[in-house]
Image (cartoon, helix red, strand yellow):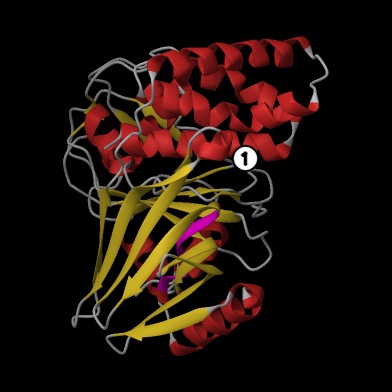
């Protein structure tokens, strides 16, 4: 089993960006340009590596390889995006890898592109790239090319050596457990060994509501691979497990001010096999809440007025500050209830919320995360 933290270190130490790996300070697949560039790199790396895995490391400074991290990215639907835009799409996995020196809310993103030995191309137009375009890696660049020759396998031995040097061992596993238990000691850390091989660690603030146990500020890691499976400072989850599986049900808090309610968002089940392998299955459970349209029209118009005040740089009253914290989620609710322009308004608010305060910007990012999960399901 590959220790993904070691794999990232080996990739960064091996060489600069090349035809089997790329590094990025960050990506943004919520915007058309960022989505197009990400798909281009996936296409190019897949085509340039027909026999071996290829990788994108996210959260690294380009000049000196400094690991600075990015936000936890829990979009399990990224394969749906790739399938929608690429012909002969490769299997792609996005994982969040914690590093000890990073803050709790930061990880390094690791994108693994599995080989398919077929030519991958854009299925349709996106941004400035045309449908039918084919990309390859030319050194550290992803370039459009005309292909009329067999793709050469030049990286398999190098990548195999890098992956072999990143294999996990008992020392790495024990260190990972001790690090987790110490770092999360204020949040009731626990661990369990599955099939005498896999070690899961989790922590969170525990509370009981009507005989049901929920956790907030949740951190869940598969220690063998140094992969963070779940992290949230806002949402609440329920956790169940037996000797064969570990189940996470994520809840989101939606509503208007004092009328909030918890809704099931997504269920993730990790099944551990006797063959030292595991599978992760994710199911969307979300049923959008429906509200009276007259009430929503009033809230929607109030949001728009508040956004206009932000644009003008006006000083907000205490009540308007409270309303601002609800702005991202109320735009989200309006979109669930047929307000077609609500998402455009939400995206329009991004730079102003970011400038206003980190707290309201985090609430914006949480609303976008929920939207992304639902959109690609």
Q: Position of residue 287 (x, y in %)?
A: 29, 38
Q: Residue at x 60, y 14 (%)?
A: 302
Q: Position of residue 299 (x, y in %)?
A: 53, 18
Q: How many marks?
A: 1
In magenta stretch: residue 253: no
Residue 313 lies in quadrant? top right
Q: Is residue 109 above or below residue 14?
A: above
Q: Position of residue 372 (x, y in %)?
A: 39, 35
Looking at the magenta stretch, what is its main secondary structure?
Answer: strand
How packed mark 1 is, by other alpha carbons closer than 10 Å (few <14, some 14-19, many 20 or more), is: some
User: In the picture, which quadrant includes the N terminus?
Assistant: bottom left
In what element is the residue under mark 1? helix
Q: Depth check: give the residue in front, 175 or 63.
A: 175
Residue on which the image places disc 1: 362
Q: Is residue 226 above or below residue 189?
A: above
Q: Position of residue 66 (x, y in %)?
A: 67, 53
Left or right of residue 207, residue 196 in this image: left
Left or right of residue 114, residue 117 in this image: left
Q: Residue at x 61, y 51 (%)?
A: 69
Residue bounds of the magenta highlight: 225-233
Q: Depth check: give the residue in front, 18 or 274.
A: 274
Residue 165 lies in quadrant? bottom left
Q: Residue at x 45, y 20 (%)?
A: 343
- Residue farthest to the right, as pictured: 315
User: In the picture, which quadrant includes the C terminus?
Assistant: top left
Report whether residue 15 is seen. Answer: no
Left or right of residue 279, residue 212 in this image: right
Q: Depth check: give the residue in front, 210 or 135.
A: 210
Q: Residue at x 66, y 35 (%)?
A: 360
Report whether residue 160 is seen. Answer: yes
């Amino acid at each position: 089993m590959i220790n993904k933290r070691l794999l990232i270190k080996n990739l960064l130490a091996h060489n600069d960006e090349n035809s089997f790996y790329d590094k990025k300070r960050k990506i943004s697949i919520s915007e058309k340009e960022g989505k197009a560039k990400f798909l281009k790199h996936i296409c190019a790396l897949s085509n340039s590596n027909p026999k071996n895995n290829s990788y994108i490391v996210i959260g690294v400074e380009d000049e000196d390889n400094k690991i600075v991290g990015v936000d936890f990215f829990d979009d399990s639907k990224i394969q749906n995006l790739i399938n929608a835009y690429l012909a002969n799409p490769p299997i792609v996995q996005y994982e969040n890898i914690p590093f000890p020196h990073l803050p709790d809310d930061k990880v390094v993103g690791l994108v693994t592109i599995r080989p398919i030995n077929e030519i991958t191309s854009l299925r349709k137009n996106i941004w400035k790239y045309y449908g039918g375009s084919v990309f390859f890696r030319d050194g550290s660049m992803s370039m459009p090319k005309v292909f009329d020759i067999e793709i050469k396998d030049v990286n398999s031995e190098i990548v195999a050596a890098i992956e072999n040097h990143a294999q996990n061992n008992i020392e790495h596993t024990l260190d990972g457990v001790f690090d987790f238990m110490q770092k999360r000691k204020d949040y009731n850390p626990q661990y369990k060994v599955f099939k005498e091989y896999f070690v899961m660690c989790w922590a969170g603030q525990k509370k009981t509501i009507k005989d049901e146990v929920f956790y907030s500020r949740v951190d869940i890691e598969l220690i063998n691979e140094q992969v963070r499976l779940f992290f949230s400072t806002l949402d609440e989850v329920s956790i169940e497990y037996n000797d064969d599986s570990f189940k996470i049900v994520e809840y989101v808090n939606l509503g208007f001010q004092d009328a909030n309610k918890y809704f099931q968002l997504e269920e993730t089940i990790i099944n551990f096999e006797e063959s030292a392998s595991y599978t992760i299955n994710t199911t969307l459970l979300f049923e959008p809440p429906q509200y009276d349209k007259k009430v929503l029209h009033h809230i929607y118009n109030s949001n728009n007025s508040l956004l206009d005040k932000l644009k003008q740089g006006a000083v907000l009253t205490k009540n308007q500050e409270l309303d601002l914290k609800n702005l991202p989620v109320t735009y989200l609710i309006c979109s669930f209830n047929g307000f077609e322009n609500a998402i455009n308004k939400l995206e329009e608010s991004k730079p102003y919320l970011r400038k206003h305060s980190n707290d309201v910007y985090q609430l914006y990012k949480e609303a976008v995360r929920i939207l992304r999960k639902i959109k690609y399901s």
